[in-house]
Image (tube, rainbow, N blue to C red):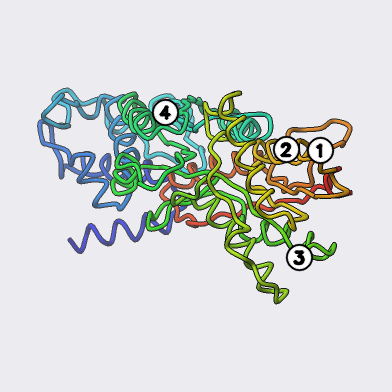
Amino acid sequence: MIYQDMVIRMMHKMNVPLYERIYNHLLEKIKNGELTSGDRVPSEKELADHFNVSRITSKKALELLALQKVIERVQGKGSFVSQNLPDLDSLKPLDPNGDQEEDGAKNAPARSASPMKTIAFILPDFADSYGLRLIHGVEERCSQIGARMFIKLTYDNREEEEEAIRSFIHLGVDGIVIFPVHGEHYNPELVRLVLDKFPVVLIDRYLKGIATAAVYTDNRQAAFELTDRLIQRGHTQIGFISAPADNTSTIEDRIIGFTMAFAKRGLSLPPGHMMTNLYSSLPRSFESRNISVDIETVRRFVEGNPHLTAFVVAEYNLALIVHQALISLGKRIPEDCQIVCFDSPDEPFGNHRFTHVRQDEFAMGRKAVDLLEKLWDGEEVQMHNIIPYRIIEGSSTR
C-alpha cells in the first residue's frame, strides 16, 4: 500500500496524462515480474478507484496494452497478462512529450495510435436565435483536437435524454456535453454519469446539487442589467415574462436578477407583474396553435396591468409573442412599451428587433470541450464556468 501511494504521488508530479500513467505503471509491473503470463490485471474499476480517475481513462490504458499484445482482454472475465508476450525490452514507457526514441517509436503506442476521441452533444433543440452557435462552438473545438462529435436532440423530453445517454455510453463515447432538459426532476442517467465519474459537462445551465462542471452565462447578472437599463430610462412598472421555471437554473436566475434590480433601486415589485406560464417557446411547441394561445395569455396579462410600460422577456421567441400581443392592443414599440429579452438571431446589418443579452454560445461550446479534455487527463476542473455576455441595443428600446 505504501509502494502504491508512492507511485501515485510520483506520477502526479510528472506531467503525464492519466491513461499514460496507468499504462506505464502496469507495463513496469509486467517488466519487473510482479505480474507474469496468465496473471489477472486489475479491472477498469479497480484501476479507476486506485488512481482516482474515470473508468474511461483506465479503459484506454488497458486497450493500449491489449493493442501491444501485452495483455489479453476476455469478455466477462477480465484482463490477463498475455501467454505469448512480445519483446518487452522493445516497449518503451509512454513519453508525455511525445519524444520516443527512434528504435522504440514503432513499437511504443504513441498518442496518435490511440483511438480517436468521440464526444456526444445532447441538447433539446436549436435555432438561429439560440443553440446553433453552441453546436458550432463544440464542433470547431472537436475538429481542432481531432475528435468526432455526435449530436442527439431530445426535444426537451426527459425519456429521450435518458435513452440518448444510455445509447452513447453503449457506443463507447469518451465524453458527453449535455444541455439538460427543462423540468423539475433530474435525469437519473445523468446523475449516474456523475457518480461514476464519467467525463460529462453541462452547458447553458447548472443543476443544483449535482457536482459536475457546467458552462453558462451569468443569467442573474444579465437579467439585472437588462432590467436596470429600463429603470434608468424611467420605467418603474415593468413586467417579467417567461416559460415556467420548473427548477431550471437559467429561468430561476433571470427571475432573481429581475427582482434584484428593483431591490437595488428601492422600488416595489407587485407579484402580479410576473407571468411565467408560457409554453410555446419550448421545443416542438412553437407552432400556430400554441402561439395563438400564448398571445392571448399575454394580451390578458397586459390588459390586467395597463400601467406596465416595459417588459423583460426570458427568450427571443417569447419576445416575438409579447411584441405581437402589444401590437394587437394598439401599443406602439418603443413609444408606448419597450421590450428587452435574451438572445436574438444574427443580423448581418445590425438591425436587431429587440435590445437583448447576447450570450457567447460559441465560446460556451468551445469551453465545454476544453473541460472534457481536462477531465480525460485527470485534471481538476471548475464546477461553474461563466462565459461573458454583451447587451446589444435593438429597435425595441430606441
- Numbered badge on residue 353: 1
Cα separation between marks 3 and 4: 61 Å
Q: Which residue is mark 2?
A: 344
Whether residue 56 is situated above or below residue 126 in the rendered picture:
below
Foreground mark, 3 or 4, reads: 3
Taking the spot 41% from the left edge, 49% from the top edge, the residue there is 378
Give the amino acid type for the residue marked by disc 3 in the picture: Thr
- Numbered badge on residue 236: 3
Q: State which tag comes first along the sequence, 4 or 2.
A: 4
Q: Indicate left or right for 51 with 214 as reference.
A: left
Q: Are circles 2 and 1 on residues that touch, CB within 8 Å?
A: yes
Secondary structure found at label 3: loop
Secondary structure found at label 1: loop
Q: State which tag comes first along the sequence, 2 or 3.
A: 3
- Numbered badge on residue 265: none
The answer to which of 225 and 278 lies nearer the viewer is 278
Q: Indicate left or right for 219 with 91 as reference.
A: right
Which quadrant would the N terminus be assigned to in this image?
bottom left
Q: How far from the left and from the top, in percent, is residue 348? A: 85, 30
Cα separation between marks 4 and 2: 41 Å
Q: Which residue is mark 4?
A: 114
